[in-house]
Image (cartoon, coloured by chain):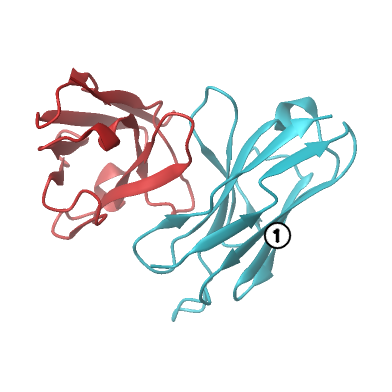
Amino acid sequence: EVQLLESGGDLVQPGGSLRLSCAASGFNFGSDAMIWVRQAPGKGLEWVSVISGDGYKTYHADSVMGRFTISRDSSKNTLSLQMNSLRVEDTAVYYCANDPNSAGHYWGQGTLVTVSS
Amino acid sequence: DVVMTQSPLSLPVTLGQPASISCRSSQSLLHSDGNTFLHWFQQRPGQSPRRLIYQVSKRDSGVPDRFSGSGSGTDFTLKISRVEAEDVGVYYCVQATDWPLTFGGGTKVEIK
């Protein structure tokens, strides 16, 4: 059974930092690109970051570039998102998922990040 | 960035009746490799999104055959042949032909 389990979401003050993790199992994690997608309360889906299967290529949305860093540890089947200089507008549920172009596509249950003073 | 425009925003449907959602992209989604990376997602209330249709018209495993996708270039459609109660939720089209990945704004399907 495929599982993606996010963790690390919390309440943090503006300007603060947080690190999200996504533990993957049940599929060939090392071969798939992985993405983070977020959903602000009551809003639609917004892609945040992507990392290639080998971890060498990363790409971030303009809204988070320079503040967020995606990384992966294929030895531990773990995807991470380091979030710095957090803003109120970063408040959202953050989901990890594998490559949407893959034949099998999976999402986690999400983790809530709240940025507020 | 590729802009994805969905319509309608809200779609009240009678149980057992068909439903159709339109998605238009600001540029062709035909990739140089010949594939079109246009997918449809369903998000039921309180749940994570799940992919229903990938590459325009291929159904994901476990997706009922009442869901179908069609289209090409910049115009795409998701159809539900007979809406059931479990189909309530928000549907998103997403393009993955050209990065960054971009989503449509969503269509909320509800039962009349």
Residue B33 lies left or right of residue B100; in this view the side is right
Colour chain A is painted in:
red
Name the residue located 54 percent from the left edge and 49 percent from the top edge: B105
Question: Dot 1: what SS?
Answer: strand
Q: Amino acid at mark 1?
A: Thr
Quadrant placement of the C terminus of chain A: top left
Name the residue located 86 percent from the left edge and 45 percent from the top edge: B18
How far across and how far down the image is residue B23, in percent? 63, 60
Vertical relation: A18 (above or below) B32: above
Residue B105 lies left or right of residue B109; in this view the side is left
Residue marked by disc 1? B77
Name the residue located 10 percent from the left edge and 30 percent from the top edge: A17
Colour chain B is painted in:
cyan
How far across and how far down the image is residue B61, in percent? 61, 42
The image quadrant that residue B109 belongs to is top right
The image quadrant that residue B17 belongs to is top right
Quick one: label 1, few (<14), some, or many (20+) residues within 10 Å? many
Host chain of mark 1:
B
